[in-house]
Image: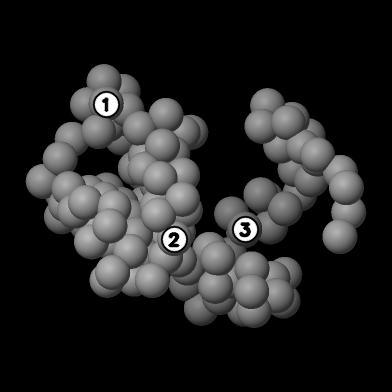
Amino acid sequence: MKKRWVKLDDATAVHPDLFDALASMHSAEEVRELMLDLCTPAELEALADRWNVVPHLLQGVPYREIHDLTAVSVTTIGRVARCLTMGEGGYQLASRRLALPRTIDTPRNASKGRQK
């Protein structure tokens, strides 16, 4: 494993073409094909775990209960929750576009009101 650390602010400078490649996909099936080529099974599982907890967090389900439902670690659940409130807004945007039900309004969602 590489010992290269990427500062969050520098993430787009590392491989900007990667984001362009993802954005160039025209369907969920195309994204699936690209992700299967890019990621190992473990990496895909980690991404899926993170996304799987988002609906539960939006519903206000306690971390321990989310863990019981998904088998995702409480630490990972906490990281996703932090991204929902203090991240770049990607989880918020995707969950709104997919019309995921929510019973809580996170500070980022409430204050920014981004409608991309």
Dot 3 falls on a residue whose secondary structure is helix
**Disc 1 target residue:** 107
Indicate the position of residue 47 as horizontal and vertical percent values.
53, 63
**Disc 3 target residue:** 22
Dot 2 falls on a residue whose secondary structure is loop
Type of residue at label 3? Answer: Leu
Indicate the position of residue 114 as horizontal and vertical percent values.
32, 30
Type of residue at label 1? Answer: Pro
Q: Which quarter of the figure is the N terminus placed in?
A: bottom right
Find the distance from the CA under tag 2 to the CA under tag 3.
28 Å
Foreground tag (3 vs 1): 1
Foreground tag (2 vs 3): 2
Type of residue at label 2? Answer: Ser
**Disc 2 target residue:** 73
Find the distance from the CA under tag 3 to the CA under tag 1.
28 Å
| CB atoms of marks 1 and 2 within 8 Å | no
Q: Residue at x 47, y 53 (%)?
A: 76
- Earlier along the polypeptide chain: callout 1 or callout 2? 2
- Image check: 66 left or right of 23? left
